[in-house]
Image (tube, helix red, strand yellow):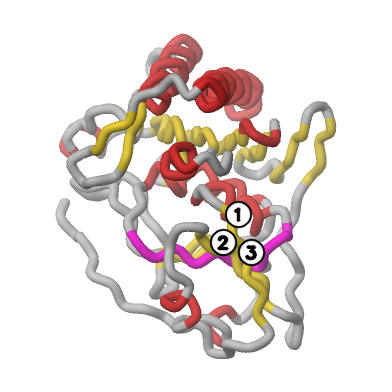
Amino acid sequence: MFLSRLLDPVKSAAREAGAELWRLYQSGDFQQQQKADASPVTSADLAANRIIINRLSELTPDIPIISEESRLAPLAQRQHWPRYWLIDPMDGTQEFVARSGDFAVSIALVEHGWPALGVIYWPKEDVLYYASRGNGAFKQQRNLINRIRVNQHQAGDRLKIAISRRQPLQPIVNLLHNKDDVDYIALGSCSLKSCLVAEGKADCYLRLGPTGEWDTGAVHVIVEEAGGKILDSEFIPLSYNQRDTLANPDFMVMGQASTPWPQLIKARRTERDLSA
């Protein structure tokens, strides 16, 4: 009941933030700068961040918030939180700047170390993807709502892989046991590529390179409720709020959980930050 009561107000907050992003995107009235890690941030990210934080603070004043665009509390403080909001006010800032329209608002609620509710809003297409633990995953476009499921990939089917518009393809190809019979679907925004898997339009999404826990929080519950899973590049589950950093390892968004993914995708060892 707690999660179901939250879902509609969170969807509304995502829509409100997305509407502001879309307004600034269309007008071009935004400023861009670089963060310390050389990734871009714009005044649109910050505007959406303010909207979401205000709405969530009104909705659940006792639940803390972690945002990509806000200062991170020390682990010693946040490791005791039983639940918290995890948000990315604009996933796909590079796509926003590049004018592709492939950017999204991402809001998750994490309970006891695992995502329990997730909402993704894509302003360009006026599409909401959302899920709460145990209640299925859904796609809402305007007033049409459909339950979504991952694709039932069968042996011998061509593998459909969601890929980035901005990153080189060859590192992804190198992870495949069979480099033939593969179709690549290019899209911006980590969240939107993950949602392609959740709704069955792609079989998997392989993410190499820097991301944060806010990039996977909302889509994690959406993908799992749609019948898929998200694991790191060594086929180990991701973790949330367990380390000083919120940096993710490389990860894989995979459809049908029963598919023998290690027979299709090679495990890739990566350096892990185990600081706590």
What kind of element bears circle 3?
strand
Q: Nearer the viewer, mark 3 or mark 2?
A: 3
Looking at the rendered structure, the kind of residue marked 1 is: Glu
Please indicate whether residue 152 sits to the left or right of residue 167 in the image.
right
What kind of element bears circle 2?
strand
Looking at the rendered structure, the kind of residue marked 2 is: Lys
Q: Nearer the viewer, residue 28 or 244?
A: 28
What kind of element bears circle 1?
helix
Q: Residue furthest top?
A: 58
Q: Is residue 6 visible?
A: no
Categorize mark 3 by other alpha carbons within 10 Å: few (<14), some (14-19), many (20+): some
Please indicate whether residue 57 sits to the left or right of residue 241 in the image.
right
Q: Tell me the residue at 66%/22% (across/down).
A: 8
Does the stretch in magenta take in 29?
no
Q: Nearer the viewer, mark 1 or mark 3?
A: 3
Give the answer, above or below, for where 1 lies relative to 182: above
Asked which quadrant contains residue 131, the reply is top right
Magenta stretch prevailing secondary structure: loop
Counting residues from the N terminus, which is met first, the one under dot 2 or under dot 1? 1
Tell me the residue that label 3 is attached to. Answer: 185
Tell me the residue that label 2 is attached to. Answer: 229
Give the answer, above or below, for where 78 lies relative to 159: above
Give the answer, above or below, for where 16 lies relative to 273: above
Q: Which residues are magenta?
A: 200-209
Q: Nearer the viewer, residue 1 or 95?
A: 95
Residue 266 screen position, x and y as percent: 46, 83
Q: Is residue 26 visible?
A: yes
Rendered-image quadrant of the N terminus: top right
Q: Nearer the viewer, residue 12 or 159?
A: 159
Counting residues from the N terminus, which is met first, the one under dot 1 or under dot 3? 3
